[in-house]
Image (cartoon, rainbow, N blue to C red):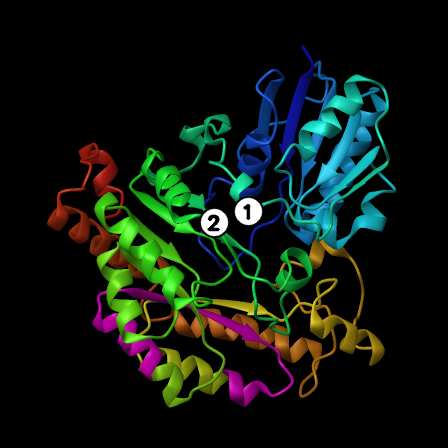
Amino acid sequence: MMNVTLIYPKWSKIPEQTEFHLPPHGPVCAAAAIPEKYDLTFIDENVDVIDFDVKTDVVLLSMMLTCQLPRGREIAGKFRANGVTVVAGGIATMLHAKEVATFVDSVFLGEAEDGRLASVLEDLENRRLKPLYDYFHDFPPIESVGPARRSILNRERYMYRGVKMVDLVHASRGCRFNCFPCATAYLGGQKFRPRPIDKVVEEISGIDNNRLFLVDNSLAQSKEWVMELFDGLIPLKKKWISHPILDDEEVIAKAAKAGCWYVYQAVFDTSDMIRDRIKRLKDHGIGVEAAVLLGTDNQDADYIKRLVDFLLEIDIDMAEFSILTPFPHTPITETYAKEGRILHKDWSRYTTAEVVYQPKNMSPETLQEMYHYAWDMFYKETPQSLRMARLFSKVVEKEMADGSYVPRRLSEDRSWDVR
């Protein structure tokens, strides 16, 4: 039996955020595509320690973020020095394929289902491993996407103050939108590829966790499909968070009924459109975490100050501030490269917490200062811990109302008491 070690490299978290670790989604999807005949070990270096002397036949390096690349290079180097074959895949590998190919034995590009990752392992067993497996934009049938293999996770490591973290699940792939700072259209194509509703509902019903994160790029791509999805979720009584939902009264009402707890909503200006969108969500009992991108070409320091004031004025629940970052293969990156505005390619600093390009209307130093200003001012009166506790109390209320609440030890429940 061949021993397979799947590794998810660690990376430095944004210092302004409360540190917690969600179960990673890419590795559990990749693991589902690995045949059961192989002896599989999973290491999430964010919560586990890597034993570089472990006896294994192959290391599968799963990298999602650009800032994981430097650590991925180190991990690959140590295992290869011990004679272990290293194969890399994942979103960051797709974004940096040529670079990753310089420090691993084989690069896998694309989605792993329909026997594709299995064929890589078969080639390795038969000593015919190729340096490149290119399935980029050659998407497998969406029906071949089955339940993620969450059994590989060490559940005890994914807790925050005694509370189990949400499980990640996706109901669709691809995105028909092509937003300027995002690489999703490059990675997953601009065609919306929804999974069959019955398969999604079956997977979600089998997850031993009442709280989930629907990590679809957007739940605003098809009203008909999303309404059918929510109808399927209602009987499960799961509580979930997601990226933006279609801004439609009927859809939002159905989302709330289906268990939506809160959403990440992009806030890019102080318009009535944004104000009304937030109000519609909150009117249906859905919390809102603003995803705020700082440093776009229409912004200066005063604009960012007004944006923070606006968030406080509309009483948004949480806010996450990110610095615009020119990741490879995003629409904005090509423009900035032509204009000579990218300052460096030290991938370890591409965390969205550091300025790595020249802003249009301010210096890099000023944008960095405004990033810290935004975090400090938004959470000045009401800290993150209290805001999160308020959101958490709302989901507990929803669970108690529909009978889905799972009592936990008193000591765990008190961990959310921030008085």
Helix, strand or loop at mark 2: loop
The three-letter code of the residue at mark 1 reads: Ile
**Which residue occupies the foreground of this view, 281 or 83?**
281
What are the residue bounds of the magenta stretch?
276-304
The three-letter code of the residue at mark 2 reads: Arg
Q: State how far apart marks 2 and 1 are (Cα).
A: 6 Å
Q: Is residue 298 magenta?
A: yes
Asked whether disc 2 touches disc 1, contact meaning CB atoms under 8 Å apart, the reply is yes
Which image quarter: residue 6? top right
Answer whether residue 388 is visible to the viewer in this image. Answer: no
* Residue 334: x %, y % from top left: 78, 73
Disc 2: which residue: 195
- Check the image and name the residue furthest to the top: 1
Disc 1: which residue: 142
* Residue 60: x %, y % from top left: 70, 31
Q: Residues within 10 Å of mark 2 (few under 14, many from 20)?
A: many
* Residue 257: x %, y % from top left: 22, 58
Residue drawn 29% across the image and 57% down it? 261
Q: Is residue 393 magenta?
A: no
Helix, strand or loop at mark 1: helix
Q: On the picture, is 118 further left or further right than 42?
A: right
Residue drawn 27% across the image and 75% down it? 249
